[in-house]
Amino acid sequence: MSRTALIVIDVQESFRTRPNWQLVNHPDIAERVNRLVRAARDKGDLVVWVLHTEPGTGGAFDPANGYVRLIDGLEPLPDEPMITKTSHNAFTTTNLQQLLTQHGISEIVVSGIRTEQCCETTARVGSDLGYDVVFVTEATATMALAHWSIRDEASVEEILADPRTLTAEQVAGRTEYVLAGRFATIRTLDELTAVPVTS
């Protein structure tokens, strides 16, 4: 029995409705995640789907608006858990840890949106809870990040024009720096989706 779970975090239409989606580094995030999902299923790993919700806010993450659903092309199997969260990490406001315990999981593979936010936070909390964490940066997505002083009201044009803005690639790189060797092992898509050679 596999002791590994793939956690797919917030790969949902909410993000594609926002103007800053045009700044995303991996617009093909659904295909990247699907590669991981197929490999996980082939190995008998548990696949857990996570969606972020902000009920009552009226925004892109309010379930009432219809965007809190997986991006087209992602299809959970009937026996794969689908959980919703209201915190950045996938543990605090869900039964994820209980699910993993029930399945005898000791290693989690983290993928999804956004690299430095819900994915990184889940990796950190998972590590602190005692899981071996694998972080697949290539199967995460994020956007250029505005300086904190203008973040909430800046247009895409202002974000791009500000020299303090971090590109999505810089954000992803910094995430790897802070996770590697402390909270997670960084692995590539190719490493995790390679077909094992049988003699």
Image (tube, rainbow, N blue to C red):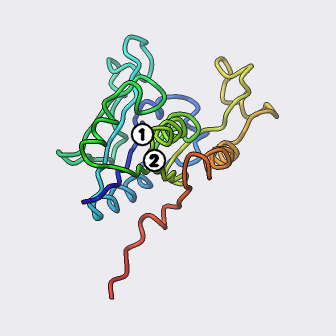
- Looking at the image, residue 184 sits to the left or right of residue 54; the answer is right
Q: Amino acid at mark 2?
A: Val
Q: Amino acid at mark 1?
A: Ile
Choose between 47 and 107: the one closer to the eye.
107
Task: Find out whether the residues at labels 2 and 1 contact each other: C-beta distance under 8 Å.
Answer: yes
Of all residues, the one furthest to the front in this rendering is 130
Query: Mark 2 sits on what residue?
Result: 110
- Looking at the image, residue 52 sits to the left or right of residue 190; the answer is left
For residue 132, above or below residue 196: above
Residue for point 32% across, 55% down: 3
Residue 160, by quadrant, is top right
Position of the C terminus by quadrant = bottom left
Of all residues, the one furthest to the left in this rendering is 78
Total numbered labels: 2
- Looking at the image, residue 67 sits to the left or right of residue 114; the answer is left
- Looking at the image, residue 7 sits to the left or right of residue 135; the answer is left
Residue 162, given in percent of the width and then of the height, sits at 79, 31
Residue for point 34% across, 62% down: 39
Q: Element under label 1?
A: strand
Name the front one of labels 2 and 1.
Answer: 2
Residue for point 39% across, 57% down: 36
